[in-house]
Amino acid sequence: MSAERGTEQVVDVVVVGAGPVGENVADRAARTGLSVVVVEKELVGGECSYWACMPSKALLRPGQALAAARRLPGAAEAVTGPLDAERVLARRTYFTSDWDDASQVQWLESAGLTLVRGIARLAGPRRVEVAGSDGTTTVLTARQAVVLATGSVPVLPDVPGLAGSRPWTSRDATSAKAVPGRLAVLGGGVVAVELAQAWARLGSTVTLLARSGLLGGQEEFAGELVEAALRADGVDVRRGVSPARVTRDGAVRVELSDGSVVEADEFLVATGRRPATSGIGLETVGLEDGGALSVDDTGLVEGVDGSWLYAAGDVSGRPKLTHQGKYGGRVVGDVIAARAAGPVQTPPWSRFTATADHRAVPQVVFTDPEVAQVGLTAAQAREAGLDVKVVDYEIGDVAGASLVADGYTGRARMVVDEDRRVVVGVTFVGQDVAELLHSATVAVVGEVPVDRLWHAVPSYPTISEVWLRLLETYGL
């Protein structure tokens, strides 16, 4: 359904942002019979579908498959050439639907949701003004709630010459039409390491510039193993440096803090993101324009009179992960619908609270080796005041892993709260470990005692047998 332009409408719920988070909010609220309008200024489906999760993984997967084949005698002999970059890029474009959102719009309409295209701005309590590309303005008034699901935007560090040098952001890096001959990457986080490896395996000469170690916030060994893999792929990893000045005259010239210079055809800046709150009218409801939003576990924005403004996903200050944002979106959609019907209780771990955001967040870094982590790292658990026991095991010593790849390299860590004898954090690093993560997530969310986990028998011979080895090493 398409809304009439240049009109005023009263609906139950207005969702600003049609990415995966906004879609989940809208779908859950509409299922209960509430009328929902979704506002989007770009493509329905959002960052993940067109410039992040999907295209980046499409770029990474062929290189992972090729590397995996080369680790197996018999298969290795059948692999005689490099990646076909043109075909990889074509497959990437297939997964983005060539940056056309027609299929996403079709889903939205099939769910009974109304789409308004344009730039949304709060215009006071429960009111949203949408400026359309045709110059008209649609005014939406929400009976129940307005939900901000506007996501986040890249942050460019304040480096002389950087902004004028036309640097790549993650959008440019995932939508590029050709492989750059030389690529410099600034950053040491997930986006930086994933895209550095993807483009290196596609044929770029890649230099990765990081002020400290890689994958800060993860277990230290995760960054070390990923760095070793990047170097094996030919990436020039330079730690302890930062750009002092950037210029572009055809090629990009990056002058570094240690006096050295890196020249590249493109310069990807992957130094983080901030919530997209500028220019959306926060000041009309008593909040600071461009400021950070704080929400409670039901998604209600704090500091706003009344219980009508919600936020979910990156814009809410919660973990910047698509799956976690979708989880928060489901919570917000459900709680709006429940509150529309009357008072509702919101205890932890109910369907109306995003309790997992605090200590049970799963994340996968899709490099080769993969990094799969959920819950608290050992350092975070100790900082939280827990009495922990840390158990490590080399995944390559598990029979199933040795069948997956000759010379399998990887490590697992289990962090146990000794007072309760429950697992509070797990990290796996290695080939094909992403699919192990949900078992760890269930253990952490369910606070399953290690004595009960002992009876969760892993199939033989699979990599999941690492669970048995961790528990044995723990002392069971």
Image (cartoon, helix red, strand yellow):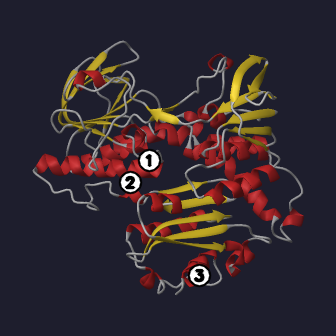
Residue found 20% across the figure and 44% down from its top: 34
Task: Classify mark 1: residues with Cα within 10 Å, few (<14), some (14-19) or many (20+).
Answer: some
Residue found 27% across the figure and 20% down from its top: 138
Q: Nearer the viewer, residue 338 or 157?
A: 157
Within the image, what quadrant is residue 50 found in? top right
> Disc 2 designates what residue?
357
Amino acid on which the number 1 mark rests in the picture: Pro
The first of marks 3 and 1 along the sequence is 1
Q: Is residue 45 above or below residue 426?
A: above
> Disc 1 designates what residue?
319
| Separation of marks 3 and 1 at Cα, in angstroms | 32 Å
Amino acid on which the number 2 mark rests in the picture: Asp
The first of marks 3 and 2 along the sequence is 2
Within the image, what quadrant is residue 384 found in? bottom left
Q: Nearer the viewer, residue 209 or 16?
A: 209
| Left or right, 275 with reference to 193 | left
The first of marks 1 and 2 along the sequence is 1
Residue found 35% across the figure and 45% down from its top: 110
> Disc 3 designates what residue?
473
